[in-house]
Amino acid sequence: MMKKLERLGDTRAPDGTTLTLYRHDGEYRIMVGAVELMSSRRHHSETVLAELACEPLRAVADARVLIGGLGLGFTLRAALRVLGPSARVVVAELVAGVIAWNRNSEYALAAAALADERVEVREADVADVLRENPGAFDAIILDVDNGADALVSGANAALYRASGVRRAAEALRAGGTLAYWSDRDDAAFEHALREAKLSFTSTHVRAHVTAGPWYTMYLARRA
């Protein structure tokens, strides 16, 4: 018997964009119109992004990490698996409904991770959190949208431009790492990294461990 696609709820971003949560045969996905923004079946790239950013902090006492974008919670869960017991993780999520979905224990999402004592959730624009916390973080992980081609909020694209990159760099502690998820190699974004005087590497990771499209993970540090 074919299992039905369940529409679990809708929510709106501050600019009016509608996000919809679906469930099908144990898989969850968030859609913007007909476009799949994220899926619990294809989350390998989000996991790898967090691992790349947090692995250098595994043994660092009182490490402080900022995650921009909660999504379906996979980046947060991966970070918590790597980080030690004294770490603190701030999650900045712009859309209140996304936080509510993840906190709902009836859904197989991130309720347990959000209840971790190391985690602080802020319903806020990550750009504001960056501005308010200069020199505060050992790692900043930005997976707020679909890369520079923002789907959820046009303001998210600013994070990938020169001014947004500089703001993120200013929120790092000495030796800190900026990690960005992008749906592709992005020459304009790479130029913005160079303009901010950051050195960077990129890694290509599939949506699923063995299948799906390839995405680009950028790691940047002060040159």
Image (spheres, rainbow, N blue to C red):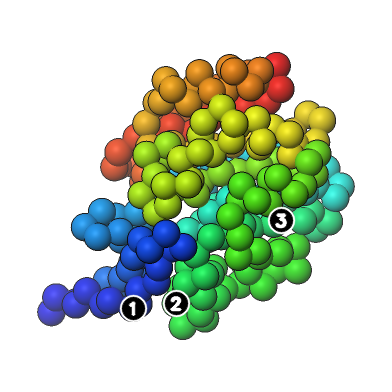
Report whether residue 92 is seen: yes
Q: Disc 2 on helix, strand or loop?
A: loop
Furthest residue toward front: 15
Please report whichever mark, 3 or 1, sits nearer to the chain's N-terminal start: 1
Residue linked to disc 2: 107
Do labels 3 and 1 touch, CB within 8 Å? no
Q: Residue at x 70, y 16 (%)?
A: 223
Residue linked to disc 1: 8
The picture places residue 21, in percent across and down from the top left corner, at 35, 70
Please report whichever mark, 3 or 2, sits nearer to the chain's N-terminal start: 3
Mark 2 vs mark 1, foreground winner is 1
Disc assigned to residue 89: 3
Q: Is residue 28 left or right of residue 112?
A: left
The picture places residue 86, in percent across and down from the top left corner, at 83, 56
Q: Is residue 129 left or right of residue 63?
A: left
The picture places residue 150, in percent across and down from the top left corner, at 39, 44
Q: Disc 1 on helix, strand or loop?
A: strand
Q: Is residue 164 left or right of residue 17?
A: right
**Where does the N terminus fall, quadrant-wise?**
bottom left
